[in-house]
Image: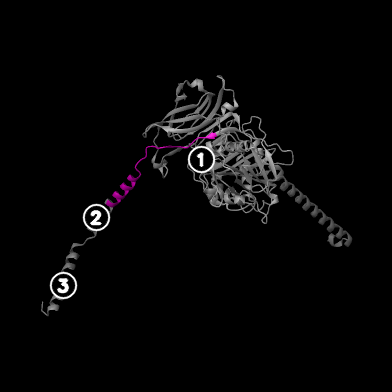
Amino acid sequence: ARALMMPPSTARRLCFLSLLLLLLLLAAAASATADAAAAEEFTEELLLRPLPDRKALAHFHFRSSAPPASAAGRHHHLFPKAISQLVQKFHISELELSFTQGRWNYEQWGGYDPMSTNNAKPPGVELWAIFDLPLAEIDATWKNLTHTLSGLFCASINFLESSTAFSAPRWGFKLNEGNLRYGALPREAVCTENLTPWLKLLPCRDKAGIASLLYRPSVYKGYYHSQKLKLKSSQSLGIILDQTLTVVLQPNTVSGKQLHSTGGQLQPSWSMEHLFSKKLSGKCLVSKSSRVFVEIEKGIVDNVDKAGSDVSSNNDLFVLSTAPDRSLKELDNLEVQSSSLYEYDVNNYNSDKPLNVGITWKLPLIWSCTRAPYHASRFLMGSGNERGSIAMSFLSTGLDKQLVDSSNDCSIKAVVFQVVPWYVKVYYHSLEVFIDGNSKAISEVVDKIHVTPSEDKLLPGTMEMLLKFPCSMQLATLTLDFDKGFLHIDEYPPDANQGFDIPSALVSFPEFNSSRSYPEADPLFVSPLLENFKEDGVVKSYTEVLLVPLTTPDFSMPYNVITFTCTVLALYFGSLLNALRRRIGEEERGLKKLLLGNCNLHCFSLNLKC
């Protein structure tokens, strides 16, 4: 009634003020949304590198970052919401999940660079996480996390929930305060069912940008591919998610030019179209930066220098099909690694002018990648289904002579981290060390050791060792004896006769750093890929997966017993029911009628009177 009694000018003024207030609220909400969207960033990068054994390395790197939850709330514009909810629910400080098929060739593809240190992973699935929780709650949280990741990536990660499948390393894998959990599934198969949900975490998926090059047949026909997801979370910086895919491919040399080297090897020329069956037609529209790098290793750079030519995109040994936008040279004080990077900004290319960078060799060339100080390998000894031995060898690659003093007091440290299933009962007191064929006392080589013995059907065995080898050593071998346990029939996998896998052991060299630095005068030049290269990374390598045959029962016996028992029961009950249901009098009367009928029929046919 009062509103009806107001003058028309007052009503119009109130309506105008209400509309203005509504517009201010909408503007404030839009500004907050824009600030949150601006705080989230996404970058995409691709690194291409020729390898000495006629192959090519392609490394895809995608980074998504989100501000702290208090600033952005629960809404995201670029960052995947599933990952944000994962971090908040399980209180994750750091997590890494990798799916790998094939094994990284440390001798041919390198073992002393950030690529092999950070992206060479063991076959199957590897998962580790650091939790920001009390120690009593970590195991239960780990089990829930494995189920969540299993559903998110369509994999059997939930098998890691069992206490027999994960361990809690102290310092052998990564230094922590007891809040780290580690698990591996060496036999897990990797296929497109795992790659598709991984791509769904990207803003443009594989529809645009660098991810559009991920042509499935090209990726899965490679010699090695490893997709990885790594995230870090903190209250001050928010969440940083790195998604990487490392692929080693054989270039399609049918249409390319092949050159025979003096060593008999072929050095094929290749391009992005040869590797991925398509060209790059532009960037993801929401990406802050989109770059492609072509890396030339130190071995090639040395050959170019010997030829008296400058390390440019067009020299006496090779030529790049597209002129780069920028050239970066590695800053190296130790003169161990000295590589060059050629950068291509994808912003300068589109569907009308696609990017198809490649390399064409002018002269035959042989080079090698720098390897780790020791080549670590692991194998089994012994025969039979009762006992055996695990042996680990360290073969010198000669790198230690270039980096450290080779005096008599010189030593090289190596850290070994190994997890053994409970049914492989390792006797850790049986450890023996041989250096250059001579037996050595444990105290001379093992500087520090931490062992968690296995418990039947409860815990796996974990061994962490810090070793010290003399610099003059050429070969060292460590052996451990073990007995093979017995499993319940329900604990055998479907392919039990194939054997049981022991996950790869991790060998790291804490005195050797694989970081690379590419100085750049432009302060606005920010590359997450190169930032990862600059981080201090300890040189490390994974050994082979061991296949242990165990005593396996005859699984055909239950089938034979069931079929035999069913046959006997069928014959018995069939005969019994036949005897109980039979009526002898009715059968005799029926038989007489049948005989009489046959006699009448016979007489009628002979016109006789019966």
Q: Which residue is mark 2?
A: 576
Of 134 and 524, which appears nearest the observer?
A: 524
Q: Which residue is mark 1?
A: 160
Q: Is residue 211 magenta?
A: no
Residue found at x 56% / y 47%: 152
Q: What is the C-alpha distance between the residues marked 3 and 1?
A: 78 Å
Q: Tell me: residue 370, above or below residue 313.
A: above
Point out the stretch of residues depicted in magenta: 541-567
**N-terminal-most mark, 3 or 2:** 2
Where residue 562 sits in the image (x, y, percent)? 32, 48
Residue found at x 51% / y 22%: 445
Q: Are marks 3 and 1 in contact (CB under 8 Å)?
A: no
Task: Give the number of the mark in front: 2 or 1.
Answer: 1
Q: Is residue 389 left or right of residue 304?
A: left
Q: Is residue 181 left or right of residue 379?
A: right
Q: Tell me: residue 19, above or below residue 451.
A: below
**Whether residue 296 is visible:** yes
Q: Which residue is mark 3?
A: 598
Q: Amino acid at mark 1?
A: Leu
Q: Amino acid at mark 3?
A: Asn
